[in-house]
Image (spheres, rainbow, N blue to C red):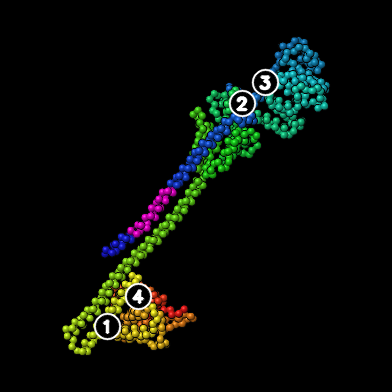
Amino acid sequence: MARPRNSRNALAWQAAVILLPVIALAALGAFYLRQDRLLVRHEAEERARTLAHEIAEKLWRGLTNSAGVSEEYAFRIDDDGALLFPPPYQKAPEPRPLDLAKLTSEQTALWQQRDAATLWRLLETDMPADFQAVANYRYATALVAEKRLTEAHEAFRRVYQRSPRAVSEAGLPVALMAGLKALELPSDISGTKWARPLSWDILCGLAIAEPSALTTTILERAARTGALSASRMGERREQWETHEALRELYRASCDQVSSSDVAPIFWIRSGGERWLASRIEQPTNHWIVCRQIDGTAKGEGSRATNNPSDRLRAMRVTVGPDAQIAPASLGDLLQPDVIPNYLSLGLVAANEPVIPAPTAPVLAAATHAENGRDLLKVSLHLARPELLFARQRQRVVWFGLLIAVSIVAALLGLSSAWRSFQRQERLAELKDNFVSSVSHELRAPIASVRLMAEGLERGRVQDPEKQHEYYHFIVQECQRLSALIQNVLDFSRIDQGRKQYEFESADVLRLVHETVKAMEPSATERQIMLRLPPPAETSLNAVIDARAIQQALINLIDNAIKHSSPGSEVIIKVSRQTTGAKQTLEISVEDHGEGIPKSEHERIFERFYRVGSELRRQTPGAGIGLSIVQHIVDAHGGRVRVESEPGKGSRFAIEILLKG
Ligand code: ADP
């Protein structure tokens, strides 16, 4: 029992040696792949952290940089938060009734009249300053009514030039009213050269720079006359609308901007729109730069989108297409390669989202704080992990394949180890049988030879015929023994690879004939007839190892005798077969014994293999005869064929190539 246990242990060791490295490799690989994934994530986090910080700082610089302040979308306030630019005005003009008590009684009487002559007389009196511009304007209007247009033009000029700051009783700027009237007079009335130049464009500019309830009227009239080119008119209109929008933004943020605690950036809500305002400090006053975040930016389509670059662009363009706030710093962020494709951006300014944070997990966030207040928060989210881990996944697949291949190789190794273990077991079993068979094969003849030799020696056998029979038997048994020993020795040489063949030309017919003759006694003993039909040729020479071929033939004839029933015959044939240039020598041994099942035809040539179970076997033998035959024939470059069926006898044929 020691041998199976030892070989089982050896097999277990082999299995361990084969499987352990694969298991260790798989475990190590899994561990390192996991580490690899963690590392990739860690690197992405590092990168995101740097990027978030950079974006926050760039945005902050962009938002609070004074270099690019554009008047178009920025209003200016003083230290107390009062609006400086665009110039403030009251939408509903405030009436400024003139105090008639300041006039003399004569002047009051003249003031009541509306005709030009009376008003001229009034103008010649010494009137208080605030009455003068209004009186002049009234006089000019009266001249228009009296169709004295050249004089009217002159009168309007005077008002426009001399009283730029005067205000009418209705609270409107008198100079602008006069300018408007003068420009509306027919164009051929060009009088003296105006000291203060006047044109529709200049008047529009003045009306915007000194805003009043009159500004829209002036812009409308200017447009109606067509005096300005469409683009210039558009510019003036846009300028006015921008100023109005900025005043509206100022109104909406008035409380915030005048508070001493106003943050550098804050939100203004006006007309359903959100504006991100930043306060840019300057020595005497401050700019409040406004950027529209949601809704429509000037000249651009809708910006209500979640795409970060659109949002950032919206922040940029609202400043006005010509004057962008630090375009480089915000523009950089729009480069598609700045934010890796697996990340998406969330942006919160002054506690309100600019770009809503994506639902994906945050990789990194950076905050810009001023005076303990978080004013800008940039977060980068892992929106598309499949892109980040693409290469790592590739490595997993490759490693998985490697492991799979190693497992397959290990399993193949294991199965081959298992097969060889089984073969070893079987071989060991067969060897055991072989030893007992050989011992049995030796013991029986030696015992009978010894009995007979002792009988002869002690003179117990007197009958000369009997004596002769004994001698004959002893010789025969010794021959059989030496044949068996020859087989065993040959087998051992073959097994150790020491068997050598000596090839020389020999007459095969003679060799077969002699062999059959030598086997005859043992055939006769079993009442079997050996028949060698006369061959077609008288001699058949071939280069062979004659001793070896004879031994192979003895083994085949011996098997045929052993497996034939008494009274039957064994036919030995020698023939030369020619097919084309090929010539073969065939020596066959045919019996009419029990035959061999087809399934055993191959196995009977294996070493130690014997058909049937060891206990049931009737015929003597050690299971090496046919394996020796096979080896000898192989050494001659030939082959052994077996044709047999149970109950129909067997035919073994040795084929050796002679030519071709
Ligand atoms: P053994 O010493 O047992 O004869 P061999 O190698 O010569 O060993 O033969 C292997 C087995 O093949 C035998 O045990 C036998 O069962 C079978 N065998 C060989 N020759 C014949 C035959 N002529 N008829 C039937 N069985 C045979």
Tell me: residue 56, above or below residue 445. Answer: above
Q: Which residue is mark 3?
A: 94
Residue appearing at x 47%, y 44% in the figure: 41
Horizontal relation, residue 491 to residue 448: left or right: right
Mark 4 vs 2: CB contact within 8 A = no
Nearest the viewer among 260 and 104 is 260
* 30 drawn magenta: yes
Q: Secondary structure at mark 1?
A: helix
Task: Tell me the residue at 70%/30% (across/down).
Answer: 236
Give the mark nearer the N terminus: 3 vs 1.
3
Which one is nearer the viewer's eye here, 16 or 175? 16
- Mark 4 or 2: the one toward you: 4
Which label's residue is closer to the chain start, 4 or 2?
Answer: 2
Question: Sequence order check: which comes first, mark 1 or mark 2?
Answer: 2
For residue 628, which numbered disc appears in the image? 4
Q: Secondary structure at mark 2?
A: strand
Q: Does mark 4 have its CB less than 8 Å from ligand 1?
A: yes
Q: Residue at x 46, y 78 (%)?
A: 660
Q: Nearer the viewer, residue 312 or 490?
A: 490
Q: Are marks 1 and 2 in contact (CB under 8 Å)?
A: no
Displayed quadrant of residue 451: bottom left
Circle 1 residue = 476
Residue type, label 1:
Gln
Disc nearer the start of the sequence (3/4): 3
* One can see residue 453 in this view: yes
Callout 4 amino acid: Ile
Amino acid identity at mark 3: Glu
Instruction: Estimate the spatial distance between the alpha carbons at disc 3 and disc 2, rounded to whole Å.
Output: 25 Å
Whole-angstrom CA distance, mark 3 to mark 4, is: 135 Å
Which span is picked out in magenta? 13-34
- Residue underneath mark 2: 76
